Amino acid sequence: MQATLRHSLIRPYAAAFRARFLLLLQYRVAALAGFATQCWWGAIKIMVFAAFYETAVVAAPISLPNVITYVWLGQAFLALLPWVADPEVAMLIRTGGVGYDRLRPLDTYGYWYARSLGWIVARALPRAILMLIAAGIVLPLVGLEAWAWRPPSGVEAMALFVPAFALMIMLAVAVLMLANVVVAASLNERGVNAVLMPLVVVFSGSLVPLDFFPDAMRPFLHLQPLAGLVDIPFRIYFADLQGVAALRGLALQAGWALALIVLGRAAMARMMRRLEMQGG
Amino acid sequence: MNALRLYGRYIGASVRAQAQYPGATLLLTAGHLAATAIEILGMFALFHRFGEVRGWSFGEVALFYGLINITFSIADILTRGFDVFGTEFVRTGAFDRVLLRPRSAALQLIGYEIRLSRVGRMLQGLAVVVLATELAPIHWEPAAVAIAVWAVAGGVALFAGILVLQATICFWTIESLEAVNVLTYGGVQAAQYPLNIYADWFRRVLTFGVPLACVAYYPVLAILKRPDPLGAPDWILPLTPLAGFAFLALSFLAWRAGMARYASTGS
């Protein structure tokens, strides 16, 4: 009885996730184009890092093989970053489709969260697999293992990376949901995306690992919420964060994810009270 | 009406259209500025930590960065018609109407839209050139200014050539191929750093494949009055932007071949 009740509670959200996920998996050409772009970007970034390391390797906070792995991880999971609000939410607001979502006997925040999760994971998955094959398997096979995406540094790192990766996605969707709420409230997705993109790219560590920024900024950079999107999970992957430091990283990710979900729910409740229906 | 005056009309119409929504245009411009300016932040962080890269200081590399961003922004402002050619002209059949008008298709596509928001990238590029002038330092004698303008012109021609090629491919594929972004946005990304920090194979691609180095790297060496660490003779440095115009000419040859085989998608 208890089990079936729980099952029926989760089912609509799972269905929302699955529908969006399967739909997006069909855009194979877009995934291939994205993959080609990301290979090029990754190659440039790695060559730039390598040139800097040659100049003054002692100044580097992370070893070169680890930075290379960091770059490939970043390119593989680029589509997991919440840098544009979910375009479907903007469309729902513009067409008035949001009214149907409000009529469903579901928690609207949870429903949108599940759909955005499906959107973000479906975009990222094929590219991540292609990148893993190219940078993790093909590069070492053709004798370029110095430039390859390396496996996690040990069993402990691998075990810690699994929850870090899950929390990274949870956090990403929580940020995305905040952006969705702002889009819904302001009816302007371009403005939101224009602000969101640079913030996410810089503060997640996607641009350069956060430890490369000037020392005075590092304590702040490691505590802010967006670090959990790239910097924390990737450093756990190659055991730059290990033991207590890794657990602290996981706690930060979880804490921020939870805080942003609570904030997003509150903002959404407020937005829905004032919502004026569009369309007709 | 000659082609130039007609083009002037196109520009006027496009600018007036965007001026109808000044708030939105300004917001988009500011957004574009912020989105493209973060790269200089990453560059700054690396130089702050490492000091220099293969003998280049931050000020010098900032000049590479600034000039290529200005170059690409101008091309990006002007070539919108070729950029969306597949999705908005070929697939919809709108290109049929373009062909019916007694003017060249290329002219109509160039005049399709002047994207004002791309000024955002230009502004941050200009700001970085000012920064580079202070840091390097760079002496802007008339000869240096002339080389910079010449390099930017060659670069605009090169990027326009890439966009024309992208549009040409649409005669076969119908859809715009986003993989061309590797050469445009990816080209800017690559040309922000001096050529000699890259691996051998990559230098060759950037010199002989898509001659980005000819419009970014070699002329900037002439402005900085530095000999090429890779050994190109000094006299050739200011001449290299010619390659951009050659690329554009070849692109238009391909474009004409594509036009000849164009078959409407109908409706």
Image (cartoon, rainbow, N blue to C red):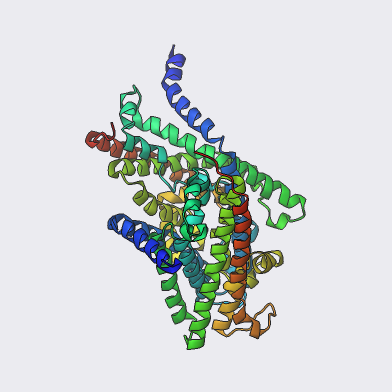
Left or right of residue A181, residue B190 in this image: right
Q: Residue furthest top?
A: A1
Residue A49 appears in which quarter of the rendering?
bottom right
**Where residue A171 appears, x then y in whole percent?**
44, 42
Position in image of residue A212 (x %, y %): 51, 63
**B10 is higher (above) or lower (below) than A126:** below
At horizontal 42% and vertical 77% (from top left) the residue drawn is B130
Which residue is nearer to you in this view: A2 or B100? B100
- State whether residue A273 appears in this view: yes
Residue at 76% from the left image edge and 50% from the top image edge: A141
Give the image quarter of residue A251: top left
Height in image: A40 above or below A136?
Answer: below
Front in this rendered view, residue B156 or B202: B156
At horizontal 45% and vertical 57% (from top left) the residue drawn is A202
Residue B203 as seen in the image, left or right of residue A161: right
Q: Is residue A69 shown to the viewer in this render? A: no
Circle count: 0
Query: B61 or A174: which is nearer to us?
Result: B61
Residue B119's spot in the image, x, y percent? 40, 65
Question: Looking at the picture, how far across and down is residue B248, in whole percent?
Answer: 59, 66
Quick one: quadrant of the N terminus of chain B? bottom left
